[in-house]
Image (spheres, grey):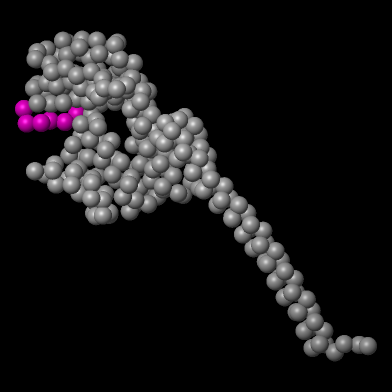
Amino acid sequence: MKLQLPTLIAVCVSIVIIGIIYFFARDESQLGIAVNLESEEFKQMRTHATDAFNAKQYQQAIELYSQAIKMRPENAEVFNDLGAVYYAQGLQYAGPNWPSWEKELSSESPEEAIAELRNAMDKINSGSILLKTRYETVADAIAVAAKEFGGEVYRQRWENEITLNILIGETKVYLLRARDHYLRALDLKSTHSVAYRNLGSFYMKVGKTDRALDFYEEAYKLDPRDAELGEYLNQFRK
């Protein structure tokens, strides 16, 4: 039997449409399964990482959160969580006392101030060194020397006194990683209140109070239900 041209065209079109439907239905089904499996694996990875963090097994938590980031590099929460682990690890390296070394410098001699800094760094492998002075020239000399010795310097003036918080060793390494991961979380999600709060804690820890309060204020704007932070801000203002 010979098909008429319109009938032949209709048959051909139907075959093509059926083929297209089957092709896309097959691909969507496989993609859906892959996404579901990956999503479940991602959730389990975060759960295991959180468990390790709560158990203070920080290196294990770092490895697990790092794997989670590879799976979901766009996820702001995981960057924040990994930052929190780095922060805890940095404080652990600092030991039980913060700052690890504290000294109020009575002399206006930059040379004596640098000698005190050297003494502190010789005795502390990792942690925070807090030096206080009334003199800008001494503060300048400390800041330059600390950077030359590999420290990270945070400087702030309080009325007639200048404080210099200097991070060294593994504490410096891990706290700076924490800071960078919090910032990355905000790059990915600018409304992530917890990352703002964590940055506030970081800057408060290193003595940059004004900057810390800016981050705390932003965190509270985004999450006014945070009663603890609200009370802290009220007390600080008073």
Residue situated in front as seen by the camera: 180 or 60: 60
Magenta: main secondary structure equals strand
Q: Residue at x 11, y 21 (%)?
A: 133
Taking 109 as reference, is 222 above or below it? below
Q: Where's the N terminus, which quadrant?
A: bottom right
Q: Residue at x 33, y 27 (%)?
A: 91
- Splitting the image into 4 quarters, where does residue 82 fall? top left
- Splitting the image into 4 quarters, where does residue 145 fall? top left
In percent of width and height, residue 197 lies at 28, 44
Residue 148 seen anywhere in this rendered image of the structure: yes
- Splitting the image into 4 quarters, where does residue 167 fall? top left
Q: Residue at x 18, y 47 (%)?
A: 231
In the rendered image, the residue lying farthest to the left is 160
User: Is 193 included in the stretch rendered in magenta?
Assistant: no
Q: Is residue 77 left or right of residue 32?
A: left
Residue 177 seen anywhere in this rendered image of the structure: no
Q: Is residue 115 left or right of residue 45?
A: left
In percent of width and height, residue 38 lies at 58, 50
User: Is 159 included in the stretch rendered in magenta?
Assistant: yes
Report the number of numbered marks.
0
Taking 1 as reference, is 151 above or below it? above
Q: Where's the C terminus, which quadrant?
A: top left
- Highlighted range, magenta: 155-160
Q: Residue at x 70, y 64 (%)?
A: 26
In percent of width and height, residue 122 lies at 29, 10
In percent of width and height, residue 196 lies at 29, 45
In the rendered image, the residue lying farthest to the front is 55
